[in-house]
Amino acid sequence: MDTPLSLVLFSGTDDKLQAAAVLTAGAAALGRPVRIFLQYWALDAFRADRIGRDHGLAPEAGAAGAAAIAAAAKAGQASWPETLRQAKELGDVEIRACSLSMDILRLTEQELDPLVDGAEGVTAFLLNAGDGQIVFI
């Protein structure tokens, strides 16, 4: 499959980042290229000094969702950063920071975790997405 799966990550909560990581790993395992575009709060979660922190869950997760996530982690489910690292080892996965979000958050590329392959603008992201599917999380 040559058509990329393109993900726009906006949310920085652990549950949404984990969902994106699982989609990425699944697509990479099938040989599909994946292009991830990090904006705002998702980008903030990829700071080198914050990537391993607890980023909370979306409000709709509630107490039951928090318990389920904790149980999955205790059972050995990989964290979202580890799942993304594994996906990059499996296949063609590229993670780019939104240059506008970088400006707004006053971030430099050096402040980002090595998972991030660089920065680009929205136009470059859309051109790279081509005719492929774009998923917003």
Image (spheres, rainbow, N blue to C red):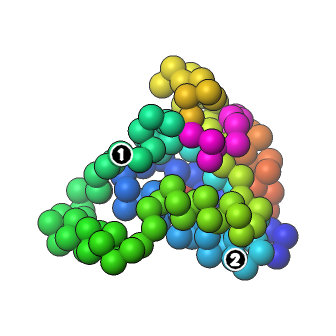
Name the residue at the left extreme: 63
Q: Mark yes or no: residue 34 visible.
A: no
Pair 1/2: label in front = 1
Along the line of sight, the residue nearer the viewer: 50 or 62: 50
Magenta residues (range): 113-122
Label 2 sits on residue: 29
Label 1 sits on residue: 53
Residue at 35% of width from left, 45% of height from top?
Answer: 53
Q: Mark yes or no: residue 88 visible.
A: yes
Q: Secondary structure at mark 1?
A: loop
Q: Position of residue 96 (x, y in %)?
A: 66, 43
Q: Is residue 15 left or right of residue 42?
A: left
The amino acid on which the numbered mark 1 sits, given as a three-letter code, is: Arg
The amino acid on which the numbered mark 2 sits, given as a three-letter code, is: Ala
Which part of the image, by quadrant, shows the N terminus?
bottom right
Q: Secondary structure at mark 2?
A: helix
